Amino acid sequence: MAKNSTFDITSTVDLQEVDNAVNQASKEVSQRYDFKGATAEIDFSKEDGTLTLLSDDEYKLKALIDVLQSKLIKRGVPIRNLDYGTVEPASGSKARQIITLQQGISTEKGKEIVKAIKNSGLKKVQAQIQDDQVRVQSPSIDDLQAVIAVLKKEDFGLELQFGNFRS
């Protein structure tokens, strides 16, 4: 009997790169003319995995998000893993928005991924949810590569990473 080859599907965000991007965005905002004399703060909490943005109004908040997103993209952080909360009023007629970093694959998303793999029509491919990742196994390495190709075409609302390949 052939030995099964496996790989893991994960979705993680490098918190150090997020911290670097936040520092770069804060520096750019402090030097930009359109933010002179205005409130524009980005607070990053590594423990909670959240970014709290505070600005004078929603317009400046959107500009702040654009600056932050550009810095995150340059640092290789997948912005698809950002979950934007609602814009809420803060003290002093300011606007606040909390952005949550999605670490790992939730059970619901894992079920969607497993369903997509089963619907791909590849025989002998098995997928199972393990904590915050999905493990895929098959005796054929070609089938595993086909699974990766199928999943890259799908949109799960997360940036998927494929790793821990073992044959």
Image: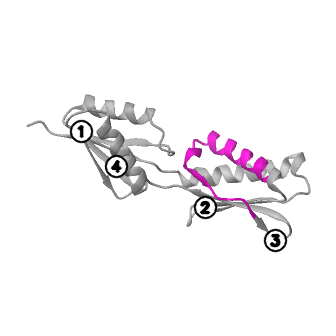
Question: Identity of the amino acid at label 4?
Answer: Val
Q: CA distance from mark 2 to mark 3?
A: 20 Å
**Three-letter code for the amino acid on which mark 2 is drawn:** Thr
Location of mark 2 (residue): 50
124 is within the stretch colored magenta: no
**Label 4, label 3: how many angstroms apart (C-alpha)?**
43 Å
Callout 1, which amino acid?
A: Val
Mark 2 vs 1, N-terminal side = 2
Q: Amino acid at mark 3?
A: Ser
Q: Residues within 10 Å of mark 4 (few under 14, many from 20)?
A: many
SS for callout 3: loop
Which dot marks residue 134?
Answer: 4
Q: Nearer the viewer, mark 2 or mark 1?
A: 1
The magenta stretch is: 61-88
Q: Quadrant of residue 72?
A: top right
Residue sitting at x 61%, y 61%: 50
Judged from the image, the secondary structure of the residue bearing numbered disc 1 is: loop
Check the image and report above or below for 6 versus 93. Answer: above
Q: Residue furthest bottom?
A: 91
List x then y, in percent, for residue 161. Answer: 43, 42
Q: CA distance from mark 4 to mark 2?
A: 24 Å
Provide residue 165's location: percent of width, then percent of height: 30, 40
Q: Residue 79, image x and y in percent? A: 59, 45
Residue hosting label 3: 91
Horizontally, residue 143 falls left or right of residue 2, namely right
Q: Describe the colour scheme in one phrase.
A: one colour
